[in-house]
Image (tube, rainbow, N blue to C red):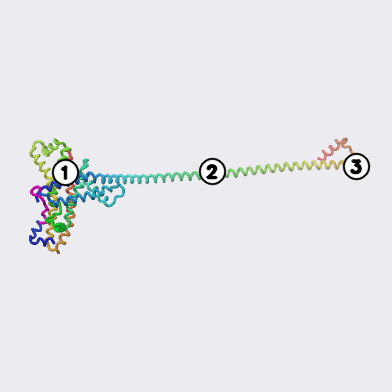
Amino acid sequence: MSINATLIGQMITFALLVWFTMKYIWPPLFDSLEERKKKIADGLAAAERGHEEIILAEKKAKSVLKEAKSQSAEIVTLAQKRANEIVEESKENAKKEGERLILAAKAQIEQERQQAKEGLRKEVASLALRAAEQILGAEIDQGKHQDIISKVSNQLG
Amino acid sequence: MASESHASEGATGYIIHHLTPLSAGEGFWTLHLDTLFFSAVLGGLFVWFFKNAAEKATSGVPGLVQNFAEMLIEFVDTQVKDSFHGHSKLIAPLALTIFCWVFLWNFMDMFPVDLLPSIGSLMGIEYLRSVPSTDLNATFAMSISVFFLIIFYSIKIKGPIGFAKELMFQPFGPWLLPFNLLLKLVEEIAKPISLALRLFGNLYAGELIFILIALLPWYIQPVLSFPWAIFHILIITLQAFIFMVLTVVYLSMAHEDH
């Protein structure tokens, strides 16, 4: 139970163990611990950031959706307005076209009537002339009696 | 088993046989071969295990070995950070070494008292004391090393003059110089002595109780040795922890400049 040289041997062993631990054991293990701590902290921060970004993106998406909805509503009203306008316009056009057609038809009718009148007048004149020829028994010189014929035909018109 | 072979020497002979170290040499130059052997083997075990973990250390998902090593590192680091506020590359590894080595020494106490000596006697070794912490040389070797470190750091941090001033002028001022010096010297010297004797006393007593239990009839032994072994698990861990924490505290006191 006495203190002896074992003490020195034990001290040497102790010093060697401490030196070895200090040099080869503590630094790598401790560094890996610190590194993992940092990694975890970074990961947590990234997750937090991601969460915030999701919230932000959701907000953004909502606002974009809202805008799109209002825009589409606007477009629909515009389109309706435009459609109404087109309908009105085409109605107007059709009316105008109809009137134009009516006018044209009227004009043509008038023209045909005039032509028919003219034709009839001429017919009547020639009939009158022939009748007068028959009556007079002589031929009427067209050149000589031009003024009489035209007088008659004017009376007919 | 062994109690029968020593029956002729009686109970006292059995106890003395168990507490006698395997020694070589004469006088001061006696070497306790069993203490040297077991502490070296246990130190090797400690270094091997941690070296293994350190080589595979990764900041990714740790394996089983690394996990355990990191648990211990974290535990020691917390203890060191709690009481030591300076920067030192030595103190944390020192604390880890002390905790693990002392724990392994003490753990030898958990083996049945007759197991290793019986194996030794089969191999022709007459005496074998397997628990290094029941050898004063082992505990004092560690505490004196710590004491040297305390002196070294005191002088390094405070300077030789600062340290001398602290020894002479505190705590009662320059007028009570001799008294101060005496008080401080006792305080400093008490540190290694209390460290070594506390560990030695606890483990020596624990071992002695195991030996006494082993002397009882076999049908009583389990009733006593089972609770004592469980209680001893607490003691061996606690003693390793106390040695470590006190070392850290003493060294942090050496770092503090008054």
Residue B258 location, x and y as percent? 16, 38
The lab-note entry on whether marks 3 and 2 share a chain reads yes
Residue B140 location, x and y as percent? 13, 47
Which of the two residues, B240 or A53, is positioned nearer the viewer here? B240
- What amino acid is at disc 3? Ile
Q: In the image, which residues are magenta?
A: B17-29
Q: Is residue B116 above or below residue A35?
A: below
Q: Residues within 10 Å of mark 2 (few under 14, many from 20)?
A: few
Sequence-first disc among 3 and 2: 2
Q: Residues within 10 Å of mark 1 (few under 14, many from 20)?
A: some
Q: Chain of mark 2?
A: A
Residue B215 location, x and y as percent? 11, 60
**Which numbered tag is attached to residue A135?**
3
**Mark 1 → mark 3, Cα distance in angstroms:** 169 Å
- B177 sits to left or right of B82: left
Residue at the spot x=63%, y=42% of the render?
Answer: A93
- What amino acid is at disc 1? Tyr
- B36 sits to left or right of A92: left
Report the residue that reaches farthest toward the bottom: B219
Residue at the spot x=14%, y=42% of the render?
Answer: B148
Q: Which residue is mark 1?
A: B250
- The answer to whether the residue labelled 3 contacts the one labelled 2, judged by CB atoms less than 8 Å apart, is no
- Please tell me in which quadrant of the rendered image residue B17 appears: bottom left
Q: Residues within 10 Å of mark 3 (few under 14, many from 20)?
A: few
Q: Which residue is mark 2?
A: A78
Residue B78 location, x and y as percent? 23, 46
